[in-house]
Amino acid sequence: MKKTLNPAWNLGLLMMAGHASAAGFALVEQSASGMGNAFAGAAAVAEDASTIYFNPAGMVYLPDSQLVLASHLLRTSGHFNNQGSTPGANKPINGNGGDLGDIALLPNFYYAQSVTPNIRLGLGVSAPFGLKTEYDANWLGRFQAIKSDLKTININPSIAFKVNDRLSLGAGVSAMYIATTLTRAVNFYPAGEGVVRVKGEDWGFGFNLGAMWQITPDTRFGMAYRSKIMQKLDGTAKFTRPPLVPAALAPDGDITANTTLPENFSLSAFSKINQQWDVMGDVTWTHWSRFKELRILKDNGTLFDVTPENWKNTLRYSLGSNYHFNEKLKLRTGVAFDQEAINSQYRTARIPGNDRTWLALGAQYKINDSTIIDIAYSHLFIRDASINDNQTAKFNGRVKGVYNGDANILSAQYTYNF
C-alpha cells in the first residue's frame, strides 16, 4: 500500500479538513491576522492570542484576557498531465484523474489569560498538518492512489513569563491526534480489479519553546521551536475483491505504521517604522528529512508495504508590512516562498507537491476596545511538478507526467478582549 500518512478525522465542530498548503503536508494557516502578512514575522508580532502557536513568549504583550476564533476556507486545485505513463497489466490508459483538489474548512481557537503582571497562561487548538487529494476512481494512476486524506488536531496549553522589559520566555506542550484514510485500486490480474482501504490513528505528544527580545521600543526579535512528535498509527486494511479472488489472497487485517511529524525552528523580526507602517520578516526551518520511508506492518510484524520517501529539509521565507490607515483600520500585505520537501525522483501521486510562492492581503478593523475583526486572502502559486512513479508492484504500471495547480485561501478572525 502507498502512503498511510494521510488521515481522515472529525471531532464535532472542529472538523479539520485540508490540503497541504505548506511544505510536505504542513498547514501554516494558524490565524487570519497572520494570513494577511503571509505569516511574516509570526514568531515576533505577538499581535493576538494566536502567538500561542507561533511563539508562546508573545503572550506577555497581550491584554489581561483574550479570545481568538479564526477560520480558513481553502480551495486547492491540481491536474495531472500524462506524458508517457504506462498501464497496469492488461489495463488501458484511462483518464488523467480530474481535479485532485478540494474545498476545506480549517478552524483555530486560542485563549490567553493573565495570572500575574509577569505570567500568562494560554490554550490553543489548531491543525498543524493536513492533506487531501482525490482522483477519479478509474484514472490511469488508480493503482498508485485514489484518495488520500490526512487530518490532525493539536491541543496546546502554554505559559509565558516576562523576565524583564526586554526579554520574555514561553513554553507549551502539545497533544496531537492524527488519523488516516487512504485508498487505491488493486490489480488482481487476470481476475480483475479491487480496492484497498487503509485507516489508522494515534495520539502523540511534544512541546514548543519561544523567546522574544524587545531590542528597542519599536523593534523586537522572536525565536520559536516546535518539537517533533512521534506517532504509531494503529488501524486496519480492508479489501474489496473481485468475485474470483479468494479472501486468503488479499486478507483484511490490522496494521501499524510508525512516523515522526517534524520539528521546526523560526527566527522572526517585527519593527514599527513610524505611526503608519510596520514591517516584519521570518525564516522557518523544518526537519522533513526525518521522513525517509513509510513502512506499514501487519499485526504479526511482517511487512504489508514500504514506500521510499527520502524527503529533504525545507526553509520558508516571508516578508510583510502593515499600513495603519487610521486608529481603527489596518491594512496588511505579505509574500512568502515555501520550499517543497519532496525530492522529485520520489514524488508520488499521493503528495505531488512542489515549491510555493504566497501573495497575501488582509485588513483588520477595530470595532471597539473589546472587539476586533480580521479578514485575509492568499493566493499560492505552485510550481509545476514532474512525476515518474513506479514504486508499486509491476502490475500497477507507471505514472509519468506533470502536475500543475494552485491554491486560494480566504480567512476570517474574531478577537475579543475581556
Image (spheres, grey):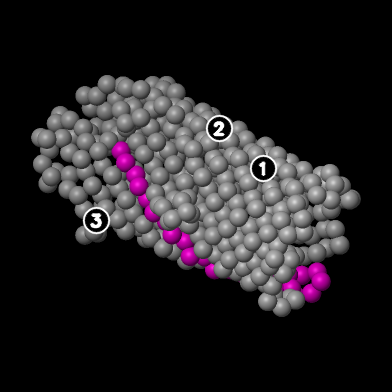
Q: Is residue 372 visible?
A: yes
Nearer to the camera, 102 or 223 = 102
Could you tell which of marks 2 and 1 lies nearer the N-terminus?
1
Could you tell which of marks 1 and 3 lies nearer the N-terminus?
3
Nearer to the camera, 171 or 397 = 171
From the viewer's perspective, tell me whether residue 278 is left or right of residue 388.
Answer: right
- The amino acid at mark 3 is Asp
Q: In the image, what residue occupies the spot 84% across and 50% down? A: 327
Image height check: is 12 above or below 91? below
Q: What is the x, y in percent for residue 151?
A: 44, 50
Quadrant containing the C terminus is: bottom right
Q: In the current view of this chain or complex, which residue is farthest to the bottom?
A: 116
Q: Picture quarter containing residue 389?
A: top left
For residue 169, the mark is none
What residue sits right under mark 2 in the picture? 406
Disc 1 vs disc 3: which is toward the camera? Answer: 1
Q: In the image, what residue occupies the spot 75% across and 48% down? A: 365
Quadrant containing the N terminus is: top left
Q: In the current view of this chain or complex, which residue is farthest to the front?
A: 368
Q: Picture quarter containing residue 321?
A: top right
Query: What's the CA distance linking mark 1 and mark 3?
Result: 43 Å
- Disc 2 crowd rating (10 Å Cα; few below 14, some 14-19, many 20+) is some
What residue sits right under mark 3 in the picture? 254
From the viewer's perspective, tell me whether residue 327 is left or right of residue 121.
Answer: right
For residue 376, the mark is 1
- The amino acid at mark 1 is Ala
Question: Can residue 140 be found in the magenta stretch?
Answer: no
- The magenta stretch is 161-184
Query: What's the CA distance linking mark 2 and mark 1?
Result: 17 Å
